[in-house]
Image (cartoon, coloured by chain):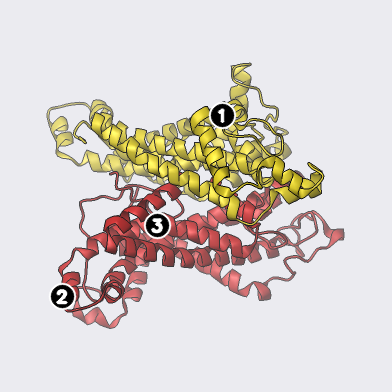
Amino acid sequence: MKQYVVRRVLLALPTLFLVSVFVFALMRFMPGDVATRMVEGHAYAPTLDALRHDLGLDRPVYTQYLDWIGGILLRGDLGRSYWTRQPILEEFVRRFPVTLELAFLTILVSVVLGILIGIVSAVRQDSAPDYLGRVLAILALSVPYFGLAVLVVVLPSIYFKWTPVWTYIPFSVNPLENLKIMVVPALVFGVTRAGPVMRIMRSSLLDVLRQDYIRTAWSKGLAERPIILRHALKNAMIPVLSLIGLQMPLYIGGSVIIESIFRLPGVGLFFFEAITRLDYPVVQSVNLIVAAMVVGLNLLVDLSYAFLDPRIRY
Amino acid sequence: MRSSTRASGIRSEEAAPAPAEASPPIVAARPLEPRGDPTRRARPWWADVWIKLVRRKPLGAIGGVIVLVMLAAAVLADWITPYGFAQTSLRERFVVASSAHWLGTDELGRDLLTRLIYGARISLYVGFGAIAIGSALASAIGIVSGYLGGRFDLLVQRGVDAWMAFPPLLLLLSIMSLLGPSVWNITIVLGIAFGIQNSRIIRGVALLVKEHTFVESARALGAGHVRTTLTHILPNVVPTIIVVATTGLSTVILTEASLSFLGLGVPPPYPTWGGMLSLAGLDHMYRAPWLAIWPAVALSLAVFGFNMLGDALRDLLDPRLKGG
């Protein structure tokens, strides 16, 4: 097990290196010039050359890369935004809790909904609740979350004079008010994500319920509840867990849209603002951190299999 | 379970580990010949697939009908719409649904129904374009990487790993912000993303096909690598490619819509469903909620249609890729 962890971590390192080179090259070699925009539109410096020099864009590309990656590895310094000159790490750390909370609540909503409906659907296969659950799952898969979010923002304000709260209050200041703000975005996002969770839960539980050990449990006279909850569910959860792991990037990507609709000051909004201003350092650093998190999460998901299914050995 | 067989699409909604135990139905020469009853051989294999679809997968057939309606709308848009998609009329701004404008008009007095119909055209244009580019790319990367194996495979796969480490939306947004929004750019970028993502699945199939004796005998008879891959491996990968492409369409269309929604997909004045829902137009929607409702409905229907059709085709053509 320990050996497996070490090997997986070592395998992740070249991936992360490639990620960093890739995102850096992308920002440097693609068309789109931030310097021109900063000088012409916003008069950040008297001339283009002066600004390029200020930003260090006149140095060779590999020095720029080494500078960036060296700063991260040696000093934990992600660089500064071109536009605000603020350290990126500080901004990221300040905004990350918002995104994390959103992701956590979204996953909570989708997992609770998906698993509950999935269990009912599988246990009462081909009954009315099963069909209802499957139709709901298909609906959830089809409705795009940003479309639903726009409708949730617009329609209630017209017909019920209700609008989501736009001013964000941190959890540490007032937990209750904060939850009130977060619950609507999390519900919107979570409900649309519950579809795939439910479908995987249902099919995997159906699979497990057909196995011999479940029949044994039935024949020794165990009640339905312990059979489903204690014997079947644990094994049936593995594909669900791997789905959530695989979907992690979707939650993070989706936070860009959800945060810009509901105006939550999280990493997603930070990233989106940076993108519209071609703020290279922010875009590449946020991409890198997020990619590193995804790699780490995938690792965690793989390791958690061993916990759920002790037969899995490495 | 680690062999990361991500099903369909740009990191699909339903990505699920494919069951590993079932071995693929491999046929050496013609992959999709209907088996069994010889009297039915007169019917081409694709007709069989359609008949099976209607009989066994009614939801898939409904999806197929939606897709056909969308196709018809896209092709006939010039004839069936009474207005131009960018035809403004400032005297008719925010008109509620009426006989002149069945679904009302937007902030510039453009007819919403007309724009929705043209939106189908853009969605399909980008969707099919990206899928065509992506399937070709996925097959090329997947087959070459799987067939050659060894160090080349290792290198390519680490590259794919790196690409997959990014949340797709973040990466696509970064690229689109640099290239600038345009129909071409988004089609190519989505195509490349789709191709790299799905090369894994194609590679997995190529790896399996490669081990069969007919490949070995072809090599023994003196067939070169190019001939072996093109005439012996590719035909056996084709069903998987079709499945990956059809199940991927809804994801590509949805991704295009989300990029256009953020203003980095298809630029105005082209009407796209994502762009019509857009963040920038949010203020107008308080005055005219139909501007939010109809594009969302159109998009949901399209995604539903492609999802159902794709799922059904997957079950019929290549049950190994089945998810939940």
Q: Secondary structure at mark 2?
A: helix
- Disc 2 residue type (three-letter): Ala
Give the distance between the C-alpha atoms of the residues marked 1 and 2, in whole angstroms.
Answer: 59 Å
Chain of the residue where label 2 is placed in the rendered structure: B
Relative to residue B233, is residue A172 depicted above or below?
above
Colour seen for chain B = red
Residue at image x 40%, y 62%? B138
Quarter containing the N terminus of chain A: top left
Are discs 1 and 2 located on one and the same chain? no
Q: Is residue A83 left or right of residue A170?
A: right
- Disc 1 residue type (three-letter): Phe
Chain of the residue where label 3 is placed in the rendered structure: B
Give the distance between the C-alpha atoms of the residues marked 1 and 3, in whole angstroms.
Answer: 31 Å
Residue A242: give x, y in percent of width and height: 35, 39
Residue B220 disc label? 2
Residue B161: give x, y in percent of width and height: 39, 48
Dot 2, how many residues are within 10 Å of its Cα: few (below 14), some (14-19), or many (20+)?
few
Residue B285: give x, y in percent of width and height: 73, 47
Q: Which chain is yellow?
A: A
Q: Is the C-beta separation of discs 2 and 3 under 8 Å?
A: no
Farthest residue toward the bottom?
B42
The residue closer to the viewer here, A200 or A33, is: A33
Q: Secondary structure at mark 1?
A: helix
Q: Is residue B323 left or right of residue A192?
A: left
Residue at image x 18%, y 40%? A211
Q: Determine which residue is flagged by label 3.
A: B198
Q: Determine which residue is flagged by label 1.
A: A96
